[in-house]
Image: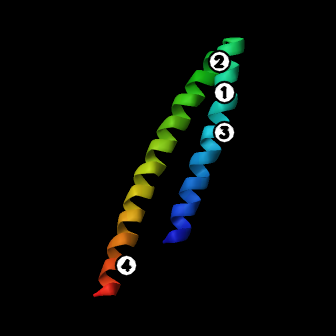
Amino acid sequence: MNASILDSLKTMIKSLENSLIDAEKLVLKGNARAGLRIRKNMQNIRKHAFDVRQLVQEVKEEKLRLKR
């Protein structure tokens, strides 16, 4: 389960790095397709953020169950 959290976070970081490159293309060169890729990356990040939140909650709940 913890590996899934790490994998999702790594995917989010990679998407942000790609978005930064595309943002430069959009702003400096006026590349409209770069804007579409940024929006797609943001949706991907949003999905992974939701997954991370759920996984973290599951880990917390599991640790609480084990304490009892």
Q: Residue furthest left?
A: 68
- The residue nearer to you, when weighing 56 against 43, is 56
Q: CA distance from mark 3 to mark 2?
A: 14 Å
- Pointer 2 residue: 26
Q: Secondary structure at mark 1?
A: helix
Q: Amino acid at mark 1?
A: Asp
Q: Which mark is residue 63?
A: 4
| Nearest to N terminus: mark 1 or mark 3 | 3
- Mark 4 secondary-structure assignment: helix
Judge the density around disc 3: few (<14), some (14-19), many (≥20) Cα neighbours within 10 Å: few
Question: Residue 60 placed where, x, y %?
Answer: 36, 71
Q: Which residue is mark 3?
A: 17
Q: Going 59% across and 51% down the picture, which residue do you hit?
A: 11
C-alpha gap between disc 1 and disc 4: 40 Å
Q: Is 66 positioned to the left or the right of 48 in the image? A: left
Q: Amino acid at mark 2?
A: Leu
Give the percent coordinates (x, y) of residue 49. 45, 49
